Amino acid sequence: MELELYDVIVVGAGAMGMSAGYHAARAGRRTLLIDAYDPPHAQGTHHGETRIIRHAYGEGRAYTPMALRAQALWYELERETGRRLFLETGFLQAGEPGSRMLTEMQVSAKEHGLPVEVLDSSEMKLRWPGLALPESFVGCYEADSGVLLSEACVQAYRDAAVALGATMLPNTPVIAIHPDAEGAEVVTAAGTYRAKSLILTAGKFAGPMLAKLGLNEMPLSPLRKTVEWFKPLTEDYSPDRFPAFLFDLPEGIFFGFPDISGEGVKAGRHDGLVRPMPEDGVLLPHGTFEDDGRDCAAYVARYMPGVEPTIIKGSSCTYTMTPDEHFILDRHPDYPHIAIGAGFSGHGFKFASANGEILAKLAAGDDPGFDLSLFTLHRFNP
Ligand SMILES: Cc1cc2nc3c(=O)[nH]c(=O)nc-3n(C[C@H](O)[C@H](O)[C@H](O)COP(=O)(O)OP(=O)(O)OC[C@H]3O[C@@H](n4cnc5c(N)ncnc54)[C@H](O)[C@@H]3O)c2cc1C
């Protein structure tokens, strides 16, 4: 039987894949999006309501132009769908003076002419009375960064992609992929589909999926992480008064969000205690382990004096790490019509809008428009 032919099939329509499918459909390509769940959902890496977006990047200068493109595309998606997806709360990064991330952030800001304010600890205390950071700390503040409503973003891309003619196949795990010189066949329990190109964005399952395509040595490690919400006792933490933040503290690297829609102040620890995912990839819920949230409760008790350090809500989620914590955005070495987005290492969401555009271009054989040399497959698979 002749299979229906798509221009592109997206395998894994989460944060990156949904955006990639939208961009492919916008470019006029016949697009099929397949996901094992019904995105947005809580089994991947995009749930928990919010994600930080920041521009002058501390983790590598290659990211800054992508962050700026991503921000422009989030605004575009807001306009196209008429939905609120971004809250301009500002973003504060703080740590010891001379810390690598702060220095890099300032260099990126300078290189790209971005408005980053440098503040000492007393200036930070004056501006944000809800914070009690160490006296020696310096902060870099970006007023035009802030918070993305992550599930709403995935839903918006889904609706916009479908409105452009893309087909969405939810609750359909991909069982096998058979690539050849002209395209690929994608096998699911619901049927087999064929496309001229593929976009593989399987989140925490990227490693096993790439192994089936001959890329056996990809060091992708899915890790279970938790985030917690805490009750603010004052108005100091409302989104118009308190920024999204990332602090490099003696206890570890903590990030968080103001009290959005009365849900509470959300905090997470970026480094520190991690638990590898079980083989089947099932995400164990928050509270499974006795120490879930312990670090964040201690962080809040010490550094956020107007917040009750009792966990009112918790969520578990996944980081899919690469050894250098940089992404994979590349074409398959043997099948250049297969674009791969993986290993977003706990900082990918903000870029999903731009990464989707990049992946759609890679799959189509077009110039991605960015220097992707930091994100190659062959750095792990020479
Ligand atoms: C607690 C936490 C906080 C974070 N904070 C931030 C932040 O503040 N800022 C930021 O930029 N980033 C942040 N991140 C990282 C960001 O959320 C991720 O990098 C991003 O969501 C990764 O997107 P993805 O598309 O790779 O994965 P996902 O969104 O999980 O998408 C992968 C999709 O593939 C599907 N799939 C997998 N296997 C199959 C299969 N066989 N068949 C069909 N479908 C399949 C899954 O169902 C899923 O929908 C955070 C992550 C966590 C966990």
Image (cartoon, rainbow, N blue to C red):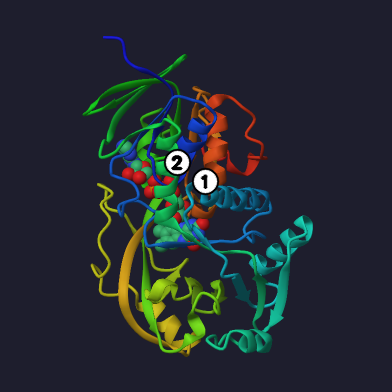
Q: Residue furthest front?
A: 82
At label 1, which amino acid type do we have?
Glu
Q: Quadrant of the N terminus?
A: top left
Q: Relative to 43, say whether 290 is above or below.
A: below
Taking 351 as reference, is 269 above or below it? Answer: below
Please tell me which residue is depicted at 48% across the width and 42% down the height of the picture: 19
Cβ of mark 2 under 8 Å from ligand 1: the answer is no
Marks 1 and 2 close (CB-CB < 8 Å): yes
What's under tag 2, amino acid-wise?
Ala
Give me the disc on residue 160. 2
Residue at the image position 65 percent from the left and 78 percent from the top: 96
| Residue 52, x across and y down, in percent | 52, 63
* Residue density around tag 1, few if under 14, some if 14–19, many if 20 or more, within 10 Å: few
Answer yes or no: is residue 98 visible.
yes
In the image, residue 291 lies at what x, y percent? 30, 75
For this view, does 356 lie left or right of residue 187? right
Q: Which mark is residue 235?
A: none
When the figure is inspected, residue 380 is found, relative to residue 313, above or below; the finding is above
Q: Secondary structure at mark 1?
A: helix
Mark drawn on residue 80: 1
Q: Residue furthest top?
A: 1
Residue 217 visible in rendering: no
